């Protein structure tokens, strides 16, 4: 299945020469390209959109840096999934593990990079929509500090959690794209890596052998010590907080359109958007206050640490994964992803493969505003010299 949206090919030449000369990129179909309608993975959303008047600023920055845009990529409907399947347009291929889902919602962007069709690609990440497909497709992926890259020209999903993100096949290129998109770091942080043992335990619930391999990898990268995250606030409250904040944000950003347009969502996506009619709005202030508390707790823990943890609770999701498997995946994936999402923190996915030829991925999470330092750290790790590390 193609990674790109059906129809006419969207190709845009560079606007000038720069550090990305000769490189090809793609953009998720939530991001505006001038004169093209942004489809959001849903035909009714597409029909309601006029052609974009101008490029999103992140697209313009890459074009000014010398890169050529090769097309727009399929997304899960309006970004509401971590799987990578789209009822209307199909499921982009996971090129290295074709029996498995590519991960979502930035599925097409990950697929295009993993296939070598483009050198890098833009996605968006709210609750893991770059981090998960990067892990599933064996790529480097970057979710930056919330707010450091402008979201003009990007269709909103849950605005207080949404970020631009990107994929590459090497840490060096991931950094080169960051050099174009990111401002100077606004904070400093220790580069002492420390494991999040609760996250490894979550991986062990699904794949004990892989959890042990990932733990050994984390230690080989210098993460000899651990730091607790769920000691002051239980993991279940992190997940509940994330879901409540996301529900309120979706209602704010998309609720009016959904109620008026009654769009045709796929059968897996429709019940998720239906949540916005049933969540308890009276509790929203409580959850937003808890988010601030959790973010403050993370700030303290990250003063002298870079967190190291599995990116996902399992190596892959099969295309025919049953409902129970998906439910357990979401519970643990959203709990792990809530760390960076609720904290507004930068997170890098680091890809590995093992002798069984399946992806393993660790993540680095840094303090807010330390994006460039985190990218430099990823480049210096001894097992990340090539495009994808082997163990």
Image (cartoon, helix red, strand yellow):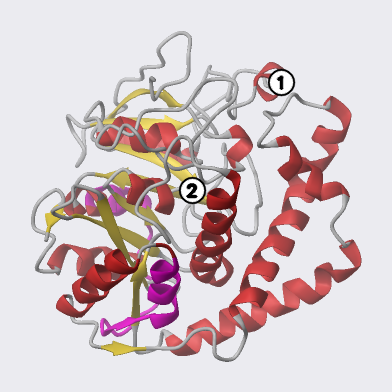
Relative to residue 289, is residue 75 drawn left or right? left
Q: Residues within 10 Å of mark 2 (few under 14, many from 20)?
A: many
Residue 117's image quarter? top left
Relative to residue 222, is residue 99 drawn left or right? right
Residue 200 appears at what percent x and percent y? 38, 74
Query: Compared with residue 69, is residue 59 higher up or lower down, i.e. above or below?
Result: below
Q: Is 18 a magenta residue?
A: no
Find the residue positioned furthest to the top.
Answer: 8
Q: Quadrant of the N terminus?
A: top left
Query: Compared with residue 13, is residue 190 higher up or lower down, i.e. above or below?
Result: below
Query: Compared with residue 212, is residue 93 higher up or lower down, i.e. above or below?
Result: above
Residue linked to disc 1: 44
Q: Which span of residues is magenta-colored?
A: 176-205
From this viewpoint, is residue 144 visible?
yes
Residue 233 appears at what percent x and percent y? 62, 86
Residue 244's image quarter? bottom right
Q: Secondary structure at mark 1?
A: helix
Q: Nearer the viewer, residue 188 or 100?
A: 100
Q: Quadrant of the C terminus?
A: bottom left
The tag earlier along the polypeptide, 2 or 1, is 1
Find the residue positioned furthest to the right.
Answer: 282
User: Residue 129 has which mark?
Assistant: 2
Query: Compared with residue 91, is residue 383 higher up or lower down, i.e. above or below?
Result: below
For image coordinates 69% across by 16% down, the residue present is 47
Q: Is 190 a magenta residue?
A: yes
For image coordinates 36% across by 38% down, the residue present is 110
Residue 185's image quarter? bottom left
């Amino acid at each position: 299945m193609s990674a790109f949206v059906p129809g006419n090919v969207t190709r845009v030449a560079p606007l000038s020469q720069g550090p990305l000369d000769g490189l090809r990129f793609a953009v998720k179909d939530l991001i505006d390209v001038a004169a093209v309608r942004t489809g959001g993975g849903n035909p009714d959303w597409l029909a309601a959109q006029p052609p974009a008047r101008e490029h999103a600023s992140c697209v313009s920055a890459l074009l000014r840096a010398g890169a050529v845009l090769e097309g727009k990529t399929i997304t899960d409907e309006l970004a509401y999934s971590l799987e990578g399947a789209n009822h209307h347009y199909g499921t982009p291929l996971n090129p290295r593990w074709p029996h498995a889902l590519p991960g979502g919602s930035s599925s097409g962007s990950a697929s295009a990079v993993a296939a070598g069709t483009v050198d890098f690609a833009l996605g968006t990440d709210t609750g893991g929509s770059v981090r998960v497909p990067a892990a599933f497709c064996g790529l480097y992926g970057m979710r930056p500090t919330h707010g450091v890259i402008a979201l003009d020209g990007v269709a909103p999903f849950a605005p207080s959690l949404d970020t631009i993100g990107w994929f590459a096949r090497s840490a060096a290129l991931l950094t080169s794209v960051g050099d174009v998109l990111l401002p100077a770091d606004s904070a400093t942080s220790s580069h002492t890596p420390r494991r999040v043992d609760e996250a490894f335990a979550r991986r062990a619930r699904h794949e004990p052998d892989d959890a042990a391999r990932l733990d050994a990898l984390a230690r080989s990268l210098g993460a000899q010590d651990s730091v607790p995250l769920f000691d002051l606030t239980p993991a279940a409250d992190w997940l509940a907080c994330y879901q409540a904040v996301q529900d309120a944000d979706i209602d704010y950003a998309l609720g009016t359109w959904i109620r008026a347009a009654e769009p045709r969502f796929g059968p897996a996506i429709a019940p998720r958007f239906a949540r916005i009619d049933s969540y308890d709005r009276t509790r929203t202030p409580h959850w937003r206050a808890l988010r601030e508390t959790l973010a403050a707790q993370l700030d303290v823990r990250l003063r002298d640490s870079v967190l190291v943890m599995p990116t996902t609770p399992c190596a892959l999701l099969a295309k025919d994964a049953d409902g129970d498997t998906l439910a357990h995946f979401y519970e643990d994936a959203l709990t792990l992803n809530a760390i960076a999402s609720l904290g507004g923190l930068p997170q890098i996915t680091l890809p590995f493969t093992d002798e069984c030829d399946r992806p393993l991925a660790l993540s680095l999470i840094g303090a807010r505003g330390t994006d460039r330092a985190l990218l430099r750290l990823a480049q210096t790790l001894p097992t990340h010299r090539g495009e994808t590390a082997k163990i």
